[in-house]
Image (cartoon, helix red, strand yellow):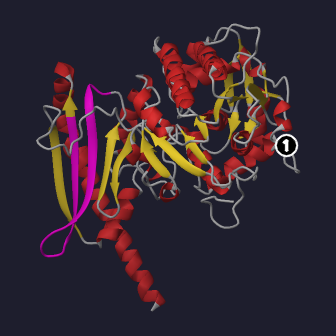
């Protein structure tokens, strides 16, 4: 089975569920948590895969990119979506807005209808959609209601559809898992909303992928929704205490209170965990309800594996092992695009975006270029930013409380980056092996900001570290912001330049000493 884990590592991937026999599967949301994991599972099952992204270059460095057809399309655009769906046998609709704005439910409906019409026009054989498990007789949050509506739109379309409804998905890098993990690890005692006593039926990401792949081969007459869940029904409190036990932590003490609204709860989650409020809120709102499967009809079409579905403890153990081995295939933070497609880039000829402030610094590094590159590619997360730690920490806290990501997102992989990866409050916008790492800021700012880190060689063969901080201000607030932070640049960016150089030179000395010992 295709997987990019080291040999012998346990898998979180799906079990084999049939043979795609060369059929063409289209995956929307291929940059996201589920989509990025579904693509290699479909390849292993024998499908040809067409991966869709609004910015195809974001998929360039994925380990499976050379094995699939990557196309640029926006599911809300009828023309590009129709072209992407040409010749497709099964289309995976993994699109959902994670916004607090008032307009997202209408946008979700329009996008689903556009996709369904385009699929019918191109004679697609089946649409598969991953939605949310929800009660039938209660008022739902806007996010849960929107996901329910999207499922109904797809089921009412001319193309047969499979709608899979899941509650909490457990897997390394999932937003649900990371929220539970950080709440449990960071708060030995906590005050929690009453919803921690609601029952939930979580499911391992491996089994979600198995159901998704298997749904492609359902008979044409099947057009319905299926509840999917693992074998265990737990409260969220049970899950946090179970996680603490599995992770070897002392017992967690929880005091439930009834006064904490979903809005207040999601803000609290965003402060304590890396999950930002706009993602935490729909997760919290889904927990206000009891979400337990009412049927297991999916087994008629995608039989349970011989060893059974993965239980809570096994799913958490596998996820923790992936985290500890720094072998997380996709992360919730992967789904956010690196800037709007219309945003200008700092490489645009003549700077297409207007004013651009630049802080540029270059230093000679007594180390081979590839050694300097390894230091730069490992920046952020646990390695830090080779600069004044207190300044970065304070700025990170300010960003978290203003609704930004702060520094808590960390990295998916401690050593290697791909385009689209989140790195604390930055996102990788461009990466050229051994040469360029461009990061776009996602912190709350009155403008657009980038950090360009380049490895170059001068005419006499010396290694150069060229560092550029770029800022495109928006309005008077942006101008004032640059004026306010400029006096600190020598400490922050100058310190980064010096410390990166020292780290690269130290790494080169260690490598040289190792080579001498081997010789």
Q: Quadrant of residue 281?
A: top right
Q: How would you rate the neighbour count of disc 1 (Cα within 10 Å): few for under 14, some for 14-19, many for 20 or more?
A: some
Q: Which residues are magenta?
A: 445-471
Q: Is residue 429 visible?
A: yes
Give the residue displayed 62% in from the left and 33% down from the top.
179
Spot the residue most to the bottom: 519
In the picture provided, is 268 more to the left or to the right than 208? left
The quarter of the picture where the C terminus appears is bottom left
Residue 392 drawn at (x, y percent): 36, 39
Where does the N terminus fall, quadrant-wise?
bottom right
Quarter of the image where one finds residue 74: top left
Say left or right for 273 vs 224. Answer: left
Which residue is located at x 49 percent, y 18 percent? 110
Which residue is under mark 1? 303
Front position in the image: 161 or 406: 161
Q: Considering depth in this image, is 326 or 72 the residue closer to the camera? A: 72
Residue in the picture at 64% in, 36% down: 125
Numbered circles on residues, count = 1
Q: Main secondary structure of the magenta part?
A: strand
Residue 262 rendering spot, x and y as whole percentages: 61, 14
Residue 7, x across and y down, in percent: 66, 67
Residue 479 vs residue 317: left or right?
left
Q: Is residue 188 left or right of residue 302?
A: left
């Amino acid at each position: 089975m295709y997987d990019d884990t080291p040999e012998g590592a346990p898998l979180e991937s799906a079990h084999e569920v049939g043979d795609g026999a060369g059929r063409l599967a289209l995956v929307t949301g291929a940059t996201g948590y589920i989509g990025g994991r579904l693509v290699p599972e479909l390849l292993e099952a024998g499908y040809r895969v067409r991966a869709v992204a609004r910015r195809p270059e974001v998929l360039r460095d994925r380990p499976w990119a050379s094995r699939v057809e990557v196309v640029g399309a926006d599911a809300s655009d009828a023309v590009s979506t129709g072209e992407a769906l040409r010749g497709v046998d099964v289309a995976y609709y993994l699109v959902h807005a994670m916004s607090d704005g008032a307009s997202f439910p209408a946008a979700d409906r329009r996008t689903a209808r556009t996709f369904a019409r385009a699929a019918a026009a191109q004679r697609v054989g089946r649409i598969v959609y991953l939605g949310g498990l929800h009660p039938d007789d209660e008022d739902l949050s806007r996010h849960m209601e929107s996901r329910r509506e999207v499922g109904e739109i797809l089921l009412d379309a001319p193309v047969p559809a499979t709608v899979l409804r899941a509650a909490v998905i457990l897997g390394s890098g999932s937003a649900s898992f990371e929220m539970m993990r950080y709440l449990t690890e960071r708060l030995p005692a906590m005050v929690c909303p009453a919803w921690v006593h609601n029952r939930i039926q979580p499911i391992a990401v491996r089994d979600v992928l198995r159901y998704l792949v298997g749904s492609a081969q359902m008979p044409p007459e099947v057009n319905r929704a299926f509840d999917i869940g693992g074998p265990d029904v737990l409260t969220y409190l049970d899950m946090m205490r179970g996680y603490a036990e599995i992770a070897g932590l002392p017992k967690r003490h929880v005091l439930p209170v009834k006064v904490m609204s979903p809005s207040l709860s999601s803000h609290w989650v965003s402060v304590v965990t890396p999950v930002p409020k706009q993602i935490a809120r729909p997760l919290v709102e889904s927990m206000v309800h009891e979400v337990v499967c009412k049927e297991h009809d999916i087994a008629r079409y995608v039989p349970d594996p011989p060893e059974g579905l993965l239980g809570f403890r096994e799913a958490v153990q596998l996820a923790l092992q992936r985290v500890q081995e720094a072998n997380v295939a996709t992360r919730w933070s992967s789904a956010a695009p690196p800037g709007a497609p219309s945003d200008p880039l700092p490489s645009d000829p003549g700077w297409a975006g207007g004013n651009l402030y630049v802080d540029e610094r270059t230093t000679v590094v007594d180390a081979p270029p590839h050694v300097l590159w390894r230091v730069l590619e490992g920046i952020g997360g646990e390695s830090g930013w080779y600069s004044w730690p207190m300044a970065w920490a304070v700025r990170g806290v300010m960003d978290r409380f203003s609704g930004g990501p702060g520094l808590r997102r960390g990295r998916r992989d401690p050593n290697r980056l791909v385009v689209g990866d989140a790195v604390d409050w930055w996102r990788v916008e461009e990466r050229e092996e051994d040469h360029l790492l461009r990061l776009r800021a996602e912190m709350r700012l009155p403008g657009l900001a980038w950090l360009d880190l380049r490895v170059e060689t001068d005419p006499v063969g010396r290694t150069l570290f060229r560092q550029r901080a770029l800022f495109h201000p928006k309005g008077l607030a942006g101008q004032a912001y640059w004026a306010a932070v400029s006096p600190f640049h020598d400490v922050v960016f100058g310190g980064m330049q010096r410390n990166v150089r020292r780290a690269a030179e130290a790494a080169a000395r260690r490598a040289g000493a190792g080579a001498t010992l081997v010789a």
